[in-house]
Amino acid sequence: MAGVLIPESFAGNDIQSATYKARFVVPREGLQALASFQAEAVESERPGRFPAHVRQQPTSRDIHLEVQGLSDTQANHETLKKWFDPSAGEQYLVASDDAAANRRIYCQPLMIFPQDAPVKNYHIVLRAATPVWENNSAETDTEVVTASGQTWANTNAGNHRAYPKFTIKPNT
């Protein structure tokens, strides 16, 4: 991902439109909210020996959004509260970067509250349990395998290791 991220939609609802404008808010701890995820070491106990490093486990991250209602109507306020209802469960937040590439992250709304000034703004806190930005749509590649064999390469466009899935379907 390059440059600045702009939130585009949450749970399939457009938060960058003629009705709403959204932006990421940098919390007090600085740019950590949009940096790569922090990881905790997971170790395995071995009797009589030092623990063995097994893997890194990503820790959750809170993402802060500010959504501005461009028209100050009660219906728009209620719509925002419905979209970011904490009881709705985890949803995808989609953001675009300055290269016009859409990425998504799976997150849970924690709270939504109106700001004092300006009154049309809402501060929203989302928690991503696995803070990995992924490509918004799966990349697919179809190849025809001949009798002499076939090789090809797929490039991961996200920011986290993702192993490819292969499906082999005979033509005849």
Image (tube, rainbow, N blue to C red):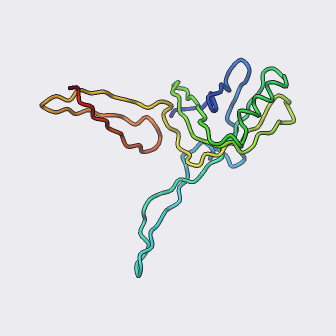
Q: Residue at x 62, y 47 (%)?
A: 32
Q: Residue at x 42, y 45 (%)?
A: 161
Q: Which residue is at the far bottom?
A: 48
Among the 4 quarters of the image, the one containing residue 66: top right
The one nearer the camera, 106 or 48, is 106
Residue 33 x/y as whole percent: 63, 44
Q: Which residue is at the far front?
A: 172
Quarter containing the C terminus = top left
The one nearer the camera, 31 or 120, is 120
Among the 4 quarters of the image, the one containing residue 54: bottom left
Q: Residue at x 53, y 53 (%)?
A: 58
Count of labels in the image: 0
Q: Which residue is at the far left?
A: 148
In the image: residue 103, left or right of residue 85: left
In the image: residue 126, left or right of residue 42: right
Among the 4 quarters of the image, the one containing residue 80: top right
In the image: residue 31, left or right of residue 161: right
The one nearer the camera, 22 or 84, is 84
In the image: residue 123, left or right of residue 128: right
Q: Which residue is at the far top?
A: 18
Residue 6 x/y as whole percent: 62, 29
Residue 43 x/y as whole percent: 46, 67
Residue 44 x/y as whole percent: 44, 69
